[in-house]
Each structure stands twice: as C-alpha cells, then as structure tokens.
Amino acid sequence: MFDGNLRSAVDKVLDPIGVVLWRLKITADALTILGILVAVAGAIVIGRGHLFAGFICLLLTGIPDALDGAVAKAAGTASVRGAFFDSVSDRVTDSLLFSGIAWHLATEEPGRIMMLPVALMATAMLVSYQRAKAESLGFDAKGGIMERAERFIALAVGLLFDDILIPVLWVMLVLTGITACQRFVKIWKQASKNTSPL
C-alpha cells in the first residue's frame, strides 16, 4: 500500500542522500550487508527480551534497506543482480526479526504463542513469493493492505509498546493473510485472461 502510493515522494528524499553516500564511496552492497548484520543484532536482543533495543535495531535495519537502491541509482550500478541481492536480504532480515520474536515469546510466554510469529513469517513469505512468481510470469502483483512497509511499521509499534506486542502480531497475521488473498485474486484474474483453451 505505502510502496505504491508513497514511492515517488520517498525517492525524492532518498535520492540526494544516495548521491552523498556514493561520493563517500559507500556501495549499495555494503549497505545491504549492513542491514543484514543489524538484523542479526536485532534478533539477538529481541530474543533476549530487550524489546526497546530491538526497536532501535529495527529502525537501524530500515535505514540501509531504504538507501541501498538510492546509492545504486546514484552510482549507475542499479542492476538485476543488485535487485536480486536486495530482495533476498529483505527475506533474510524478516526471517531474523520474526525468529527473534519467536525466541522471546518461547522464553517469556506460556503455551504455544511462539508459533504466532512463525505463522506470520510464513504468511509474509507467501506474499513475497506471490509477487516474485507473478513478476517472473509477466504479471503485476504489487499492492495489498499489509505489504513489507506496513509490517515494518506495525512491528516497530509492537516492539516499542511491548504490552501490545502479541495483539499487534495477531493483527499483522490477519492483515498479511488478507494481503495474500488479495494478491492471489489479482494474479489469478491476470492469468485467466492469458489462458488459452486446449
């Protein structure tokens, strides 16, 4: 949702920063790797119960993730390889953070509630897979009520106000599930138009 509606406005802010970082000899790949390393730290501190520190790490993870594309554009090195690396790093980052939350809940909460972030991670991966597969087939799969940017914001709220972390995760799971259904329907309609009778 945010990705489609705010992308051009965000790019106007990030592109000049990307030029500055490129002049400082900071590469897009270096930023992508930095984001993964910060996510590792975030997973560890969240898992150990330091949710505010996890909130800070989440914010710090988002900075290089937002800027690597702007640096690649400024350097003239934007490529399919870079897009692939960025997409894979996004999935790695998501997996690390959700795993940290599962670790935290397994330690602090009774029962099987630690499976909640696991289910959320699986549903988020389904949403990402739908887009990747659809685009490989030439279809448009963008959109939905809970894309990665929305998950990022919701997770930040849950970590910042830890008393509502579990309710936030439930809301994220429901909305991410709705997004998966929205994308399935969108892709199905496009694919049906391109289906030839036997």
Image (tube, grey):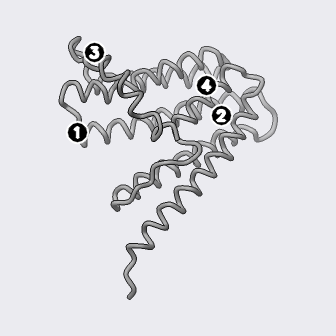
Q: Nearer the viewer, mark 1 or mark 2?
A: 1
Q: Quadrant of residue 89?
A: top left
User: Please, what secondary structure does the residue beneath circle 3 have?
Assistant: helix
Q: Nearer the viewer, mark 3 or mark 2?
A: 3
CA distance for labels 3 and 2: 35 Å
Q: Is residue 15 left or right of residue 104?
A: left
Residue type at numbered disc 2: Ala
Disc 2 marks which residue?
102
Give the residue drawn at x 53%, y 18%: 57
Name the disc covering residue 79, or none.
1
Q: Position of residue 11 (x, y in %)?
A: 36, 28
CA distance for labels 1 and 3: 18 Å
Disc 4 marks which residue?
156
Disc 3 marks which residue?
21
Kindly check if marks 1 and 2 are in contact, taking CB atoms under 8 A apart as contact.
no
User: Please, what secondary structure does the residue beneath circle 4 have?
Assistant: helix
Q: How many marks?
A: 4
Give whichever of discs 4 and 1 has the lower sequence position.
1
Give the residue drawn at x 62%, y 30%: 155
Compared to 87, does 142 lie above or below?
below
Give the residue drawn at x 65%, y 45%: 175
* Residue projecting furthest to the left: 76
